[in-house]
Image (cartoon, helix red, strand yellow):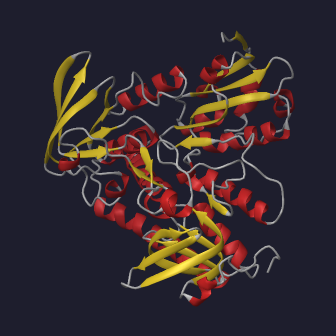
Amino acid sequence: MPDYLASPSDPGLALSGVELFDLVVLGSGEAGKFLAWTFARKGWKVAVIERRWIGGSCPNIACLPSKNIIHSAKVASFFRRGSEFGLPEVTVTVNMSAVRERKRAMVRGLVQLHEDNYASSGAKLILGEGRFVAPKTIEVSTIDGGRRTLHGTKVVIGTGTTATMDGTPGLAASEPMTHIEALELDEVPRELLILGGGFIGLEFAQTMQRLGSEVTLIDRNDRLLHGEDPDVSDELGEILARQGVQVVLQAKVCEVFGKSGERVRLICQKSSVEGAIEGTHLLVASGRSPNTRGIGLEENAAVRLDERGYITVDEYLETSAKDVFAVGECNGGPQFTHVGFDDFRIVRDTFNGIERTTKNRVVPFCLFTDPEFARVGLSETEARRLGLKYKMFKLPMKRVLRARTLSETGGFMKALVSIEDGTILGFACLGSGAGEMLAPVQVAMKAGWTYGALNDVMFTHPTMSEGLINLFSSEPQIAQARA
């Protein structure tokens, strides 16, 4: 055991029935579980408290289950495009129960992998609700009705986020779905209304349309995915419209009537004009809120929260309380599983006395619509806001030969390059396989390569990544941003 993992400062804890650990983790999500397994295998005494989802939301109710169902929807879309590929035309009726069972089977396998890791590592998994009752001390109400109190020399908080339900009159009473309930549907909603044009709303809109729903997507902003560049928003909107999704923008929902699963009616205001939108089901995908309230953080653990309820952390992810760290979505960082894994690496190295922080890390992401949208580094909007001068390369996906072989030519890719030294400032791709195309560009950015060095790489033909050569060989636009 490392020297700094001494006994708790209050020796009376051991005499009062408090269980002592080297590391206590509240929440079994991406960062927390890897910290637990890593240090348990090093001989630390480790406990993980999880109230419901073993392994966190990603393998149970979020990333992986949603991508599973997205793929089922893509297969259904191929059947409808059969004549394009020389196949007979068929009428497709989706068995939603079978789609759900395929997803559930995957989740069961993932949970088993997690349980095996706990068993092999020696980390103790405790199922129950945890609440801080003193500094670095958590009381657990276990699922079997028991009660345990755990104290950690070091504590990691990874309680995640939950779907935001705002105070719109009638919204809560309508019992809308979040992504959790939507992933458990055993029938295709006839008319699905989705509130929110962000990541979750866009993925579910296309997926449910392909599975057979009539989908209406409502957003209060003037364009979808409003944090991205306008050309991305416009192209995504056109793609969804061609596939049959009705998009209603700049619409404020004023009141909700009815019950999701039966009949719901939204009273919306758009350009000072009120109107109604009706459907059979309602899905709320309008943001996330941290799971930090009511667990004794500020009052009992001296862990500060910001005005939104997220835990405040420094560049090492340590909270206002010494030896208490916050990882994953509850610390207010980018809400992606891969960020949680990087949080694990930062805390792991900090525990091992190695310098590693959140400073200057570049966060990639991918929206799993079809085609995908992926980006790393600066967007044009951000570059202009910073007042940067840059070269912008842009190429339609129809110029990528692999995309032509697949009949997947929608979208484009673009890259921002520094005028000064030729390094890549940002890359975005809206196209088939965009998430995979992101990787070589991100590696080049990490290595500090110029775009010319990446352009000199011999990519396999015909692959999507080969399109990067066409991109960086095209004629760039010179942009001088206004500060």
Who's the residue at 61% across and 64% down the image?
Answer: 156
Evaluate whether residue 313 shows in this view.
yes
Across and down, in percent, residue 396 comes to 60, 24
Evaluate whether residue 463 shows in this view.
no
Across and down, in percent, residue 336 comes to 57, 49
- Residue 295's image quarter? bottom left
User: Which quarter of the image is occupied by the N terminus?
Assistant: bottom right
Who's the residue at 65% across and 45% down the image?
Answer: 436
- Residue 30's image quarter? bottom right
471 with respect to 71 (left or right): right
478 with respect to 186 (left or right): right
User: In the image shown, does 66 or 141 lie closer to the viewer?
Assistant: 141
User: Which quarter of the image is occupied by the C terminus?
Assistant: top right
Residue 325 lies, with reference to residue 107, above or below; the image says above
Residue 6 lies, with reference to residue 325, above or below; the image says below
45 with respect to 25 (left or right): right
- Residue 301's image quarter? bottom right
170 with respect to 317 (left or right): left
Across and down, in percent, residue 453 comes to 87, 32
What is the total number of numbered labels drawn onto the structure image?
0
Residue 339 lies, with reference to residue 444, above or below; the image says below
Who's the residue at 47% across and 43% down the image?
Answer: 308
Across and down, in percent, residue 267 comes to 17, 30
User: In the image shown, does 333 or 308 lie closer to the viewer?
Assistant: 308
